[in-house]
Amino acid sequence: MAVEHSKEQEEQAATIKAFEDVVNMSPSALERWLQTQQSRQVGLTHEGEHEAVGHQSGRRIVELLRKKHAQLDAEDYRQMRKVVGYVHRHLAQRPSGDVRDTRWRWSLMNWGHDPLRDEPD
């Protein structure tokens, strides 16, 4: 007997896949990155806050990566979709030349994506 999946389950599975496709840093690598000075130098910081949006998101991504899929809630799925959208938009703005030590790369890394991992050695 075939298992029927609800539209919501299909959307959740698609969100998880898209999130896992764009987040190419492990939780421990992302945690180490978020402790660096470069990580803290990039991104938009809202008035009255001391931490950039991307840096906050990075900490949240670590939590999401460590959760079992069955533990994810609606807010987790919203955050995952936000991460996917941000990474795709930011990748489309890639500057020319070597991006190794650029604010563009550092910002993406705050969101769990290291664009240098996509490049051939």
Image (cartoon, rainbow, N blue to C red):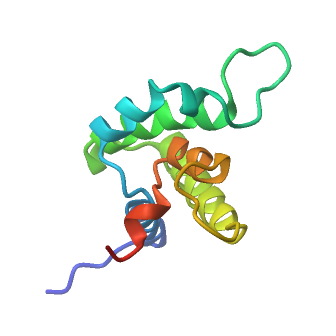
Q: Is residue 28 left or right of residue 42?
A: left
Q: Is residue 87 above or below residue 4?
A: above
Quadrant in which the C terminus is drawn: bottom left
Evaluate whether residue 13 shows in this view. no
* Residue 105 visible here: yes
Q: Residue furthest left?
A: 1
Q: Residue furthest front?
A: 97
Q: Position of residue 105 (x, y in %)?
A: 58, 52
- The residue nearer to you, when weighing 100 against 84, is 100
**Residue 23 appears in which quarter of the rendering?**
bottom left
Of residue 107 and residue 58, the one placed in the foreground of this image is 107
Residue 45 vertical position relative to residue 42 in the rendered view, above or below: above
Residue 74: x and y in percent read 51, 45
Taking the view exactly as shown, the residue that stands out farthest to the right is 47
Image quarter (top left, top right, bottom left or bottom right) of the N terminus: bottom left
**Rendered location of residue 109, percent (x, y):** 51, 47
Comparing 120 with 45, the one in front is 120
Which residue is painted at 38% across and 64% down in the image? 117
Above or below — where is 33 with respect to 117? above
80 vs 29, left or right, is: right
Which of the 4 image quarters holds residue 75?
top right
Locate residue 35, reporting x and y percent.
44, 24
